[in-house]
Amino acid sequence: MAVAAADPWRSLSDGDREQAQGPRRTDGRDCKRLLTPLERALRERIRSDGPITLEAYMEACNAYYYATRDPLGASGDFTTAPEISQMFGELVGACLADCWTRAGRPGKAIYAELGPGRGTLAADALRTMRMAGLEPPVHLVETSPVLREAQAQAVPGAIWHDSIDDLPQAPLTVVANEFFDALPVRQFVDGVERRVSVAAGGLAFDRDGQVVEQSPARAEAAAALSGSIATNGGVALVIDYGHAKSAPGETLQALHGHKFAAVLDRPGEQDLTAHVDFEALAEAARSAGAKASPVVTQGLWLERLGIAARAASLARRHPDRTEEIAASHRRLCDPQEMGSLFKVMAIHAPEWPRPEGFE
Ligand code: SAH
């Protein structure tokens, strides 16, 4: 696929994944290779306690992975929308500021971001929020020490938290881009939870078949965020790749060096994500007392917010970058690229208006 060859992000179809990984292997691997430090620890844990759930595996892998590197960009494993173009963060900031304005400009509002990566999205969003008269304190929910350092460079004065529960009790303007996809999923085959065991040459799944995924970790995060929004006021934009309606199927995938890999290979050294079930997030948000918007595609949402006008104005100011700006616009919005696989949903307090771009 042309897009994958250029620079895959976490967004290809099942067919592409199969092609990249080859047939699924649930048996042991025979390749002689060095174990990663995490794989050694996991093998010991499984030998002493028995097979671990896929959810525990994904959680352990991602905690190790993010704690030990900056995975973004050309030298890393994947690229995200804010790293493609400043237009993405600018439109997120404009959307949040507009919603805050229509909510009556509550004085103590803060900007919060979940999993802010390099801080690029925050810096771009805060710039446009400032132009709308909103200069909020910045609170970042981030567990990785490496990424916290990058965020400190991009967003001076930010305050960090390990968890959503630690955010201040204040009206929130929040964005979470590619945060929920990194939270662990459970997988079930014929109603039985899938586990990871030790096999001859590596790790292996204990069962195979038609998979159903669920993510209590995501529902919990969405409920914590929505509970705070319902109580204190606020709005959150959740942007991720995934589906608007719950459906069975396996979506867990691994990326290593911008290529798909097998999910049990190189534990802790590759990016593990699964598609986000927006219906489940919306349900968690509503149960916590907040409102959830319809789910729209990223391409449609950015076009409705005026990305074409923003691209034209940027190109006028930087004529030498006209082609690059047009290419970023296409990457973010084209249905063949990030435009339709990525979705956007807003969660907002009942007394706050629905943000722009959702109808
Ligand atoms: N939003 C950024 C980065 C996406 S990568 C962007 O769009 O570029 C996922 C981000 O979530 C990273 O910053 C990672 O460190 C963070 N993250 C992953 N799991 C987390 C967890 N359980 N708690 C807090 N942050 C987490």
Image (cartoon, rainbow, N blue to C red):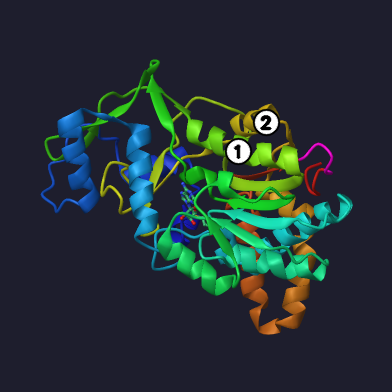
Quarter assignment of residue 334: bottom right
Question: Is 15 on the left or on the right of 141, as rendered?
Answer: left
Inter-mark Cα distance, 1 to 2: 8 Å
User: Which amino acid type is marked by label 2?
Assistant: Ala
- Taking depth in this image into account, of 51 and 259 the one nearest to the observer is 51
- Would you name the residue on which mark 2 appears? 288
- Would you name the residue on which mark 1 appears? 224
* Residue 351 on the magenta span: yes
- Closer to the chain start, of discs 1 and 2, is 1
Which stretch appears magenta? 349-353
Q: Residue at x 53, y 48 (%)?
A: 179
Q: What x and y, as percent, mark residue 169? A: 68, 47
Do labels 1 and 2 touch, CB within 8 Å?
yes
Question: Is 257 on the left or on the right of 14, as rendered?
Answer: left
Quarter assignment of residue 327: bottom right
Q: Secondary structure at mark 1?
A: helix
Q: Residue at x 68, y 76 (%)?
A: 322
- Taking depth in this image into account, of 103 and 94 the one nearest to the observer is 103
- Taking depth in this image into account, of 123 and 253 the one nearest to the observer is 123
- Taking depth in this image into account, of 86 and 105 the one nearest to the observer is 105
| Label 2 near ligand 1 (CB < 8 Å) | no
Query: Looking at the magenta stretch, what is its main secondary structure?
Result: loop
Residue 333 visible within the image = yes
Q: Residue at x 48, y 64 (%)?
A: 148
Disc 2 residue crowd, few under 14, some 14–19, many 20+, Cα 10 Å: some
- Quarter of the image with the C terminus in it: top right
Q: What x and y, as percent, mark residue 247? A: 54, 26
Q: What x and y, as percent, mark residue 99? A: 81, 52
User: Which amino acid type is marked by label 1?
Assistant: Ala
